[in-house]
Amino acid sequence: MAAPKEIVPLLVVKTPQPVPDLAVVGANEKAKQLAVDKSLEDVKVVKDNNDTAIQEKLPYPISVFFLISCEFCERFNYYGMRTVLVFYLSHRLGYTDDAATILFHMSAMFSFMLCILGAIIADSWLGKFKTILYLSMVYICGCTLLTLGAIGPLQLPANTFTIMGLFFISVGAGGIKPCVASFGGDQFTVPQQLKQLTGFFSLFYFSINAGSFLSVSVTPILREDVHCFGELSCYPLAFGVPAVLMIIAILIFLLGSRLYIIKPAAGNIVVNVSRTIWTAVKTKWQQRHLKSRAHWLDYAAEQHEPQMITDVKIILRVLCLYLPLPLFYALLDQQGSRWTFQAARMNGDVGVWRIKPDQFHIVNPLLILVLIALKDVLINPVLKFLHLSRPLQKISLGGILAGVAFICSGLLELQMEQNYPVLPYVNNIQLRIFNTENCTYEFSSNLYNNSVKLLPYSVYTDKNLHVPSVYDLTYTLSSTDGSCPLFEAGRQQLTHKHAWSLILNARNTSSSSFWTSDFVNKPRDTYPQVRSIANTKQTSSIRWQSSKEQFIHPANETKLMRMAARNYLVYIDDIAVKGYELRQGGVYTLLINELQPGSYYTKLVEVTAPNELSMLWQLPQYVFIILAELLVSVTGLEFSYAQAPPSMKAVLQACWLLTMGFGNVIVVVIAKLKIFERQSYEFFFYAVLVFIDMLIFMWIAHKYKPNVETEEREDVVSSKKNLEKSAKYLE
């Protein structure tokens, strides 16, 4: 029997599929030249011990499916948590909108900036596999702390747990961000599996958007439509479900551990670039009295290779273009903070479906996918027709479109402000008199020269009473109808900056009216609020029954009660009375009068008007901001990758992430300063800033000298698709 033939790898080749040089980064020079000069196919040439050449197809790495599933779960967790975060901070923990915005953007800032740390740890110390594993554990700890802090019955310090949880999430999410995609790329043999690698990035990008889409759809439903621990909202579930997905992500990641190709840490280019710059600065200072050199980086020539110095010079020129970009990302990242708060002041009813304010982000992944699909067939031809096809022109246009988006949001805010409730201010009070009787009364007081007429089942409102900080009110109530109950004369001390209500309810107040200080602003959490004033012979209970839930409270519960925005049928002592609709942002008072046993008259008084403007009016600003994202993020990466030397690609990605981080710093600073009393003014301020910023960018772009040598040795066209797929992941 003949001895078995020994198969020895000889050479990797391909047939008819042109491959750009960019795809063969990391291969040896001989393989690079072969990839450029020839067309290759996904096969490798091997030889047996008789030197006979045999072609063998490379198998598709099954391990990448574990990474794609892992990425889907991780992105579901990240976007799901951030979708409901600002509402949790403001509505549950009591932070102001400004403070919630600051915390939201600080967590994003740390996430982007700590990406650098994750890249350094992976490339210089632990390698990608261990970095992903260990930092995912930190990530899970953060998600767990956030979820536990939201569980009210545990009585944990929710604020402390939230801050700690957000910090751990930032460390974990930021640390693994630069590792997962590149670890997936490590599973392929390049350039032999270039086509398969491109397909992997397509699946990887799809998993990111699928996770984002589902989480943005689901977590607001868990937050608002599920009631837990005696609360209308269920933040423990809204945070807990994404946390479980993150645990599943790490389990999936570990399941594929035996299949992974794990490359050891081989040194980090970010560290090397930093050392080169530091050496140049230090040496220049030490030799400041000697003859100056042509370029300040030339001072590092004695300790670093000439190619490294040349590459750093090139990358610094590209990075000068990045200087104005943080302001663009300051606008882009407010979709999850300021724009969410704006949506909360709008009406989400769209036919039979009611969009939740934090659910409106669903348009982001949808529009990104649609616009990327239209990029080559519509957007690029239009830009070419307008003579705006050059990369730096596209980036400038993207920044301008971001400004247009914020002009749209500012105009929308101005329109909404017209319907905002008038609130009491310094040396001002609001007066309301609720008449639950089927009688007409005259209200006489030292506030008015003439008496005020109170009709049956009505509310009298005066929002413009000027008084000192404390006012002693004396008043009388009279009626010409002798059959009507009489109310005693009264006195009340009224303090300014409050809304005061006088309740006429003879049966339950022993012929004496009573006063209460009212809440008349729009509810911050969008839930309608309602109270009842029952003029009944005995204490009754009221049940608000909807198709999904019921709310029961005493009939004379003058304290406002949070309820879901729905259609309700009102029951008094289990007797169906009348149906009412409670709408988002509204504050209501239900007046009840018992006409005879078992028969009631009810009237729902609208104290604060509900949200009127449709949430769909936010669509134009979303279209503009996502067009801007496409033009700036994708085009910026295309241009930068084409300009940077092959050894500087990692540095470029790190600096791009830092740009996003500094954008969040800008939002934090402006929110902290509290420059504007009106949100519309702040939106217009951002628009003006980004217009000025783009003028600066255009000036820098005009001065920029392209790196022709890099352009010649890089095939930009081949990188476009992968860059479009990675743009979303970098955010």
Image: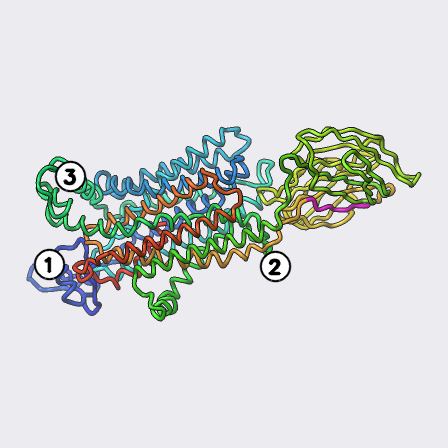
Judged left or right of residue 653, residue 96 is right
Give me the disc on residue 351.
Answer: 2
What kind of element bears circle 2?
loop
Q: Is residue 602 magenta?
A: yes
Real-space Cα separation, disc 2 to disc 3, in angstroms: 65 Å
Q: Determine the residue positioned at 25% across, 56% down.
A: 703
Whether tag 1 and tag 2 are in contact, CB under 8 A, the answer is no
**Percent x, y for residue 229?**
58, 36
Q: Residues within 10 Å of mark 1 (few under 14, many from 20)?
A: few
Between 617 and 158, the one lying in front of the other is 617
Q: Residues within 10 Å of mark 2 (few under 14, many from 20)?
A: few
Q: Residue furthest left?
A: 50
**Percent x, y for residue 486?**
88, 34
Real-space Cα separation, disc 1 to disc 2, in angstroms: 64 Å
**What amino acid type should be assigned to the residue bearing mark 2?**
Gly
- Residue where numbered disc 3 is placed: 279
Residue 1 in view, yes or no: no
**What amino acid type should be assigned to the residue bearing mark 1?**
Lys
- Residue where numbered disc 1 is placed: 30
Between 727 and 199, the one lying in front of the other is 727
